[in-house]
Image (cartoon, rainbow, N blue to C red):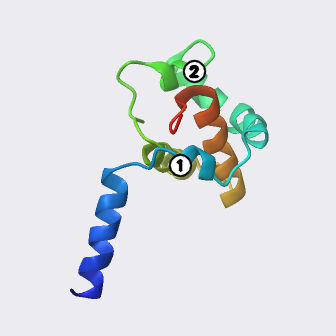
Amino acid sequence: MHRTTSLLLVLGVTFTFPLPALSLLLAGEAEEGAPVHESRCLGCHQANFGGDGSSVYTREDRRVNSIEGLMGQVERCNRMTDANLDADQIDDLVAYLNETYYRFGD
């Protein structure tokens, strides 16, 4: 099998079937992500979703439905808002959001 085809097959299987224990493998620290969330995310979320801003995570029609989706959404928000989060901050933020709102892998 061609090397590229093998890689695509592995990636396709990986992202089609999320790993149930992935939350245990997240690189970030949730307690470090809380202040990042407060300083870099809440203002925009409150302005766009009202209240304390958490409805973006808890609404019935939320966009994020997997840990991979959460990682992608944090990356998109970082780019769209020019938040300039570094890789560690992104990892911490993903861990915080997963632990606080999503609970993927539980």
**Foreground: 71 or 41?**
71
Q: Quadrant of residue 8?
A: bottom left
Query: Neighbour class for label 2 at 10 Å: few (<14), some, many (≥20)?
Result: some
Task: Please name the amino acid that badge 2 sits on.
Answer: Ser
- Mark sitting earlier along the chain (2/1): 1
The local secondary structure at tag 1 comes to helix
Instruction: Locate residue 54 relative to residue 37 in the image: left or right.
Output: left
Q: Which mark is residue 22?
A: 1
Which residue is painted at 43% across and 19% down in the image? 59
For the residues bearing labels 2 and 1, Cβ distance under 8 angstroms: no
Of 47 and 63, nearer the camera is: 63
Residue labelled with disc 2: 54
Residue 89's spot in the image, x, y percent? 71, 51
Residue type at tag 1: Leu
Residue 102 versus residue 27 in the image, above or below: above
Looking at the image, is 74 positioned above or below residue 56?
below
Instruction: Count neighbours of disc 1 (C-alpha within 10 A) and say few if under 14, some if 14 to 19, many if 20 or more.
Output: few
Task: Name the image quarter holding residue 101.
Answer: top right
